[in-house]
Amino acid sequence: MTVRPLVSVVDDDESVRESLPDLLRTGGYDTDVFESAEAFLAVAASARVDCLVLDVYMPGMSGPALQEELLRRRIPIPIVFMSAQIDADTRRELIARGAVECLFKPFGGEALLEAVELAIQGR
């Protein structure tokens, strides 16, 4: 039996948490979803996560703060950021800090699947 890569989606928007797993499954990935960075951190150390699809702006811990915490804990997970509020400067900064991609909402399904594939291949 082949193990499918696991992609975790972290977003405070319920509609994103409901729609992205279906798209990711059509791309051949297993998925899990979290409504906050804190909820993801509670399982991050013990989970087998191959890619993290992460919202930039969330209540509580932001996506970039989660990225920093994962680096501090030495948990190397490739990250694809997404946001409706992002600008080009923030995108450049996140990629310079190690993100694979930073997509602007709304983005196409193909763009997300390509970014996730790039993240997993580069792992």
Image: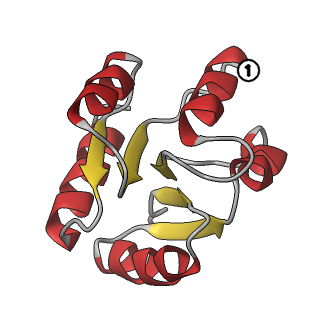
Q: Is residue 34 left or right of residue 11?
A: right
Residue found at x 69% / y 25%: 69
Residue 2 position by quadrant: bottom left
Compared across the picture, whether 48 is left or right of 30 comes to: right
- Left or right: residue 95 versus residue 47 is left
Residue at horizontal 38%, vertical 27%?
94
Percent from the top left, x then y, of residue 46?
78, 44
Above or below — where is 98 with respect to 30? above
Against 111, is 74 above or below?
above
Determine whether the residue tagged by mark 1 lies in a helix, strand or loop. Answer: loop
Please name whichever residue, 45 or 13, is drawn nearer the observer in this view of the structure: 13
Q: Residue at x 19, y 55 (%)?
A: 114
Q: Is residue 17 left or right of residue 106?
A: right
Count the numbered circles shown. Answer: 1
Q: Does 5 appear above or below 66?
A: below
- Does the image show residue 1? no
Amino acid found under the numbered disc labelled 1? Arg
Mark 1: give few (<14), some (14-19) or many (20+) Cα within 10 Å.
few
Q: Which residue is mark 1?
A: 73
Q: What residue sits 49% from the left and 52% below the top?
A: 55
State the image coordinates of residue 38 (x, y, percent, origin top left). Answer: 78, 48
